[in-house]
Amino acid sequence: MPVLIRVLSFMRPYKLRVAYAWACVLGSWLFVLATPQIVGWAIDAGLNVQVANLNGKVTHVALGNAHTLTVAATAIVIAAILRGVFAYGQTYLAEWVSQRAAYDIRNAIFDRLERLSHAYHDKAQTGQLMSRATQDVEAMRLFISFGALRMAYILILLIAILVIMMMQNWQLALVAWAVMPLVAWRSIAMTSQLSPIWMRVQDGLGRLGTVMQENFSGVRVVKAFSREQHESKRFAREAEALFSDSYSTARISAVNSPIMTGLSMLATVATLWFGGWQITQGRLEIGELTSFMLYLTILQLPVRAIGWIVMMYSRATPAAHRIYEILDAESAVREKHDAHELTNVSGAVRFDGVSFHYNAVSPVLEDVTFEARPNEVVALLGPTGSGKTTVVSLIPRFYDVTAGSISIDGRDIRDATLASLRRNIGIVQQDVFLFSATIRDNIAYGAVDATQEEIEQAARAARIHDFIASLPDGYDTWVGERGVTLSGGEKQRIAIARTLLMDPRILILDDSTSSVDTETEYLIRQALAELMKGRTTFVIAQRLRTVKNADQILVLHSGRIAERGRHHELLRRNGFYRQIYDLELRDQEEALQRHQQREGARAPSPAAGS
């Protein structure tokens, strides 16, 4: 219940409409309660039925009153119309408030996910997050609309009917209520059964969404390895588990619903029997019994609705827990309340005794210290798992250091606002992500106010303008999901143009171009050279050309800086860098020398030219 009360706080901004809904609830139940009284009065006063018990024989005498019956019929019609008006207002306002609350919950979830650090998203499953933002929010919407606002109507109606029945005939009321403890017991039992099953249903929806998301995103891999049948079976297993749990909830509800209906009918039979006996004894009028039976019939609505509300409560509780797991999640990277804007950045970056680990068992970086001066190129080199990517991920605060500090121009990056810090850092990754939008929108993603001229200028610098101009729709060409309609080299150059348009002072590059052809690599290198001008650049080095031209090479091994210096200095030391060079870079250098020799042989000599 506490977590559901927290969800109801999303109704607070709409308290005026909630008040109107409550007014409609009160108006509706007033006319619902008035109808049996009018009917009872019409029978007793309009028909004026007299009951006599002579020598054990019951005699009925009816003396009709047309005027009274006409008044009663008119009153019933008016009550029905007004009841309908208030019921419409109650339903409309409840739906409006629940839809707005669901809108706010979805926005809160999305906003929270956008602001959580990489550490959270490293562990989260996309399918689970999508399920919580859709299925779980819908469960909460139904709870707010039916379980919260309309539950108030049902509870008020239930209490009011019970009070009226007690005031009319307390003996008859006790007979009618005899089954109430059984109804309450079945409701509690159903709640206990349904809550854990609904939790499994919600989790199952998340797992199913994860399988679908992975297969839709990786459909080319699935087809390349002919794993369609395997993935179909994997999806079927999750769907079967979801079906089983969903069927269990339906079965439990199906079993309990007729039980509650049967208990309600049992109360009706007992009431008719005892009420009829009281009439024969002259203790009760026929109109009073009719009115009492109408109240008992109306009572069936809230009594039966209890089971339905219990089911919604059982579904809403786990959904609320899953939603608040996101809303209560704390980001590992937090912005100080007095953080300042990072302005006039020259690009001096310093790591001072930096250590980082995802958990205490597996340190990633240990005591890393270095300084990158403005306009320098710093190459990060090392085997897989040495910490290269982690180093560059710490600069824009995708993660926060465990120990030590990182400063830009002498200012600790933790004292700067995240937005201003990241505005000054441009990142071009090997795995380029493009949105399902136009090429123009993708280039201007980090600078939405850029003019067409500025966009084209960035595209020219990235050596991609001519390609874009050759497309039928030019910059208005729609890019498929994740840029699937473009080649790897085209996507990478669009990403370079996107970064150029931001004009950051600090640049982070993944230098891998091994998956593209020679011409595309040449174009990308030209674009990167343009991008790196006048900026402090960190490169995860994969190619010899980058390493040789770097102002500083940091050789990482097991999370520590094993060596540092320039290319020729490190070769002379004959250390760890030399091992990497011999294993990975020497072949590149020999291939480059052979290429240069071929190009030199093709060039005409001065004599031949004369």
Image (spheres, grey):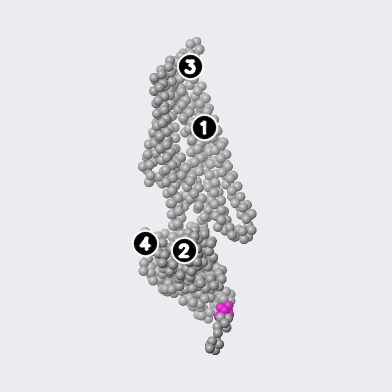
- In the picture, the disc for residue 475 is 2
Tell which circle, 4 or 3, labels the residue nearer the N-terminal end.
3
Residue at horizontal 37 percent and vertical 43 percent from the top:
15
From the image, tell me which residue sits under label 1.
182
Q: Whole-Å distance between the Cαs marked 4 and 3?
A: 85 Å
Determine if residue 263 is in view.
yes
Between label 2 and label 4, give the one nearer the viewer.
2
Q: Whole-Å distance between the Cαs marked 3 and 1?
A: 30 Å
From the viewer's perspective, tell me whether residue 79 is left or right of residue 250: left
From the image, tell me which residue sits under label 4.
339
Tell which circle, 2 or 1, labels the residue nearer the N-terminal end.
1
From the viewer's perspective, tell me whether residue 334 is left or right of residue 182: left
Determine if residue 555 is in view.
no
Q: Whole-Å distance between the Cαs marked 1 and 4?
A: 61 Å
Type of residue at label 3? Thr
Label 2 sits on a secondary structure element that is helix
Tell which circle, 2 or 4, labels the residue nearer the N-terminal end.
4
Label 3 sits on a secondary structure element that is helix
Residue 591 vs 108, above or below: the answer is below
Where is residue 19 shown, x and y percent of the image? 37, 40
Residue at horizontal 56 percent and vertical 37 percent from the top:
254
Type of residue at label 4? Ala
Where is residue 146 shown, x and y percent of the image? 46, 40
Label 4 sits on a secondary structure element that is loop
Q: Quadrant of residue 193?
A: top right
From the image, tell me which residue sits under label 3.
280
The residues colored magenta run 590-596
Between label 3 and label 1, give the one nearer the viewer.
3
Q: Whole-Å distance between the Cαs marked 2 and 1?
A: 70 Å
The secondary structure making up most of the magenta span is helix
Where is residue 523 shown, x and y percent of the image? 51, 72
